[in-house]
Image: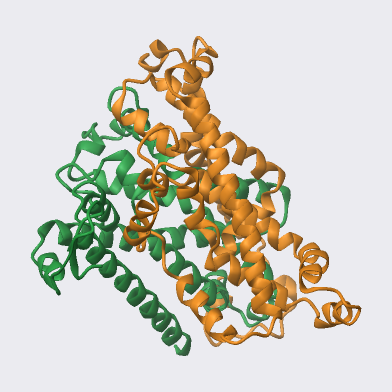
Chain colours: A orange, B green
C-alpha cells in the first residue's frame, strides 16, 4: 500500500501515522535493504582498513614471508626484527627527532602567534586594523604550493636551507589560525575584558588570563590540526631540506623507499611508527581531529 | 618573479616580460600536466562528494555502531599521504601486492597497474578518494544532525516516498555544505603532489604529471624558478576561478 502513497496528488494527511510505515510484504524489503546497506558498509570499511592492516601485517613479516605465495595479510613467522633493524638501516632516530621538532615547533609557534594576532584583531583599536584583517583574509585561500617558489627563495637567501628554523619560521603563523581564533574571540562577551580593563589589567594580562583560558577548545582544535598537518607534510620538508639531517618521517621514508634497497618489512615498520602517534591521539581526542578537519584544515 | 629569467643561486635577474608565459602556452608538458590535474579533480571531487553523502546518510545516527563506522571511514584522513602512497604502491606491486591477484581473479589482466599508461592515473585517483572520503562525510553528518526531524516528518505526512524526501528535503538542506566541501576538495585536488611523487614520479611517460609535480620539477630540479613561478600563477588563477564558478553554480541552483 505504501507504494501507492508515492503517487502525486494522493494526499495522506488524513491517514494515521502507521499508514506510511512499512507493513506486510514490504517489511521484508525493508529488512533486505538494511542487510544490503550494512553489507556494503562493512565491505567499504574493509577496503578502507586494508592498507593499514597490510602495513601492520607486513611490518611483522620476515622478508621471505613478504614474497611468500599465496599472499597473506598476516605473517606466518611473525618477527619483531623489522622494528629493531629500522634503527640501524636508516637514520631513523634522526627522522623521528626531526618530525617532533618540526611538527612540535610549528604547532607551538603558530598557536602562540595566531592567538596574539587574533586577539589584536578582535579587541584592540589601532590604525590599519581593517586593512590588516583584509590582508589576512586575502591570504586565507592561497595554498602554500602556489607560493612555494618565492618562499623557498627567501629561505635560501637567509641561508636557512637544511635548518630547523627554515622549516619552522615560514609556518610560524597562518591566516587560517588567525581567522579561526579571531572569530572565536569575537564571541567572548566584551563585558569580561572591559571589567578587567577597568580594574587596571594590562592587555597582556587580559589575553593571558581571560581570553586564552576561554579559548581552550579552539586552541586545542588548532593545535591538533597543526600537529597533524606538519607531522604528515611531505612537499615542504622535501623542498627545504636535502638530506636526512633535517627531513621529517614521510620525506625521509620516501627517500629511502626510492633510492636505497630497504626491506619491505622495515619500511612498513617505519610507516607504522609514523602513523602510531596520530592514531593514538585520534583514539583519545577524536572530536578535535574531526572538528579541525571540518573547520578545514584539510590538506 | 614570473616576469624574470633568474636563478636561486645568483643575483642576476633579467627582465623577460611575458616570455615565460609565452613558453608556457607552447609547452606540451604544461598542457599535459593541466589535463591530468583536471581529469583527477573532475573525477575525484564528485566521487568523494557522492560517496561522502551516501556514508553520511547511512551513518549519521548517534548509535555506537554508527560512530564506530564513521571513525573507520575517517581514519585515512589522519594518515600521511606520502607514507600511505608507499603502502598502496606495495599493495599494487605485481610481485608482492595483494590487489593484482585479487583483481586478476575478476579478469583484470594488467598486473602492473602503476607502470600502465591506462591505469596509473585511475589508481592514483582511487588512493586520493580513499584518503579523504572522511572529510565530506563528517561535514554532511554534522549538517544532517542539525536538520530538524520535523522537516522529513512533514514531507512524509504529505506522502513523499523516501527517495523524494531525500531529493526534495535532504539534498536542498545540504546544499551549503556541498558547496563548502566541493570548494575545499577542489583546491586540494588541484594541488595533487605527494601521491604522484611517491607512487609514479609522474610516469609512465608523464601520464600522471600534475601542475604541482611540474612546478617542483621545473623549479627544484631544472632550477628555472621564473618559469615555475609562471606555472604557480596559472595554478592560482585556476583555483580562484573554480572557486568563484562553484559559488555561482550552487547559488543558481538554489533558485531551482
Look at 63% across and 80% down and name the residue there: B155
Q: Percent position (x, y) of residue B113?
A: 25, 37
Residue sitting nearer the eye, B219 or A292: B219
Look at 21% across and 62% down and name the residue there: B226
Residue sitting nearer the eye, A8 or B71: B71
Q: Quadrant of residue A115?
A: bottom right
Quadrant location of the N terminus of chain A in the rendered image? bottom right
Q: Is residue B122 visible?
A: yes
The outermost residue toward the left is B26
Residue sitting nearer the eye, B29 or A10: B29
Q: Percent position (x, y) of residue B33?
A: 21, 57
The outermost residue toward the front is B11
Q: Above or below — where is B100 with respect to A67?
A: below
Q: Percent position (x, y) of residue B245?
A: 36, 79
Look at 57% across and 39% down and name the residue there: A100
Residue sitting nearer the eye, B103 or A76: A76
Q: Can residue B147 be seen in this view?
A: no
Amino acid at each position: 500500500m505504501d507504494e501507492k502513497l508515492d503517487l502525486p496528488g494522493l494526499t495522506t494527511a488524513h491517514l494515521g501515522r502507521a499508514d506510511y510505515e512499512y507493513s506486510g510484504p514490504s517489511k521484508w524489503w525493508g529488512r533486505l535493504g538494511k542487510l544490503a546497506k550494512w553489507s556494503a558498509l562493512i565491505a567499504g570499511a574493509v577496503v578502507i582498513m586494508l592498507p593499514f592492516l597490510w602495513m601492520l601485517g607486513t611490518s611483522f613479516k620476515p622478508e621471505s614471508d613478504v614474497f611468500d605465495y599465496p599472499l597473506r595479510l598476516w605473517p606466518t613467522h611473525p618477527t619483531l626484527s623489522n622494528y629493531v633493524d629500522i634503527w640501524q638501516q636508516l637514520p631513523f632516530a634522526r627522522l623521528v627527532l626531526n618530525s617532533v621538532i618540526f611538527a612540535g615547533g610549528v604547532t607551538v609557534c603558530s598557536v602562540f602567534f595566531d592567538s596574539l594576532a587574533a586577539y589584536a584583531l578582535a579587541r584592540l583599536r589601532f590604525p590599519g586594523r581593517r586593512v590588516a584583517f583584509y590582508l589576512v583574509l586575502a591570504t586565507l585561500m592561497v595554498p602554500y604550493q602556489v607560493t612555494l617558489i618565492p618562499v623557498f627563495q627567501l629561505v635560501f637567501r637567509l641561508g636557512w636551507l637544511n635548518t630547523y628554523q627554515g622549516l619552522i619560521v615560514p609556518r610560524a603563523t597562518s591566516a587560517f589560525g588567525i581567522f579561526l581564533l579571531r572569530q572565536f574571540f569575537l564571541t567572548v562577551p566584551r563585558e569580561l575584558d572591559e571589567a578587567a580593563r577597568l580594574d587596571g589589567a594590562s592587555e597582556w594580562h587580559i589575553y593571558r588570563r581571560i581570553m586564552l583560558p576561554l579559548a581552550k577548545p579552539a586552541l586545542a582544535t588548532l593545535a591538533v590540526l597543526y600537529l597533524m598537518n606538519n607531522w604528515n607534510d611531505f612537499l615542504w620538508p622535501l623542498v627545504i631540506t636535502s638530506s636526512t639531517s633535517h627531513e621529517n618521517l614521510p620525506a625521509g621514508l620516501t627517500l629511502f623507499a626510492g633510492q636505497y634497497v630497504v626491506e619491505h618489512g622495515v619500511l612498513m615498520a617505519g610507516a607504522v611508527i609514523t602513523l602510531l602517534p596520530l592514531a593514538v591521539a585520534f583514539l583519545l581526542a577524536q572530536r578535535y581531529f574531526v572538528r579541525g578537519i571540518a573547520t578545514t584544515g584539510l590538506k | 618573479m614570473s616576469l624574470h629569467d633568474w636563478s636561486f643561486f645568483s643575483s642576476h635577474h633579467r627582465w623577460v616580460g611575458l616570455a615565460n608565459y609565452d613558453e608556457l602556452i607552447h609547452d606540451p608538458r604544461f598542457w599535459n600536466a593541466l589535463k591530468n590535474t583536471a581529469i583527477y579533480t573532475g573525477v575525484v571531487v564528485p566521487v568523494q562528494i557522492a560517496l561522502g553523502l551516501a556514508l553520511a546518510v547511512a551513518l549519521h545516527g548517534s548509535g555506537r555502531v554508527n560512530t564506530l563506522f564513521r571513525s573507520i571511514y575517517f581514519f585515512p584522513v589522519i594518515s600521511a599521504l606520502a607514507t600511505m602512497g608507499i603502502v598502496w604502491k606495495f599493495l599494487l606491486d605485481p610481485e608482492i601486492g595483494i590487489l593484482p591477484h585479487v583483481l586478476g581473479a575478476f579478469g583484470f589482466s594488467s598486473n602492473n597497474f602503476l607502470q600502465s599508461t591506462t591505469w596509473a592515473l585511475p589508481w592514483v585517483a582511487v588512493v586520493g578518494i580513499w584518503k579523504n572520503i572522511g572529510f565530506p562525510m563528517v561535514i554532511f553528518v554534522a549538517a544532517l544532525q542539525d536538520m530538524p526531524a520535523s522537516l522529513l516528518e512533514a514531507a512524509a505526512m504529505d506522502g513523499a516516498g523516501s527517495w523524494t524526501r531525500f531529493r526534495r528535503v535532504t539534498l536542498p538542506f545540504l546544499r551549503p555544505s556541498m558547496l563548502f566541501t566541493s570548494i575545499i576538495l577542489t583546491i586540494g585536488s588541484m594541488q595533487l603532489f605527494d601521491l604522484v611523487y611517491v607512487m609514479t614520479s609522474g610516469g609512465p611517460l608523464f601520464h600522471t604529471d600534475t601542475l604541482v609535480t611540474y612546478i617542483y620539477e621545473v623549479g627544484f630540479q631544472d632550477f628555472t624558478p621564473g618559469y615555475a613561478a609562471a606555472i604557480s600563477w596559472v595554478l592560482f588563477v585556476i583555483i580562484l576561478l573554480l572557486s568563484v564558478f562553484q559559488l555561482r553554480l550552487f547559488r543558481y541552483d538554489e533558485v531551482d
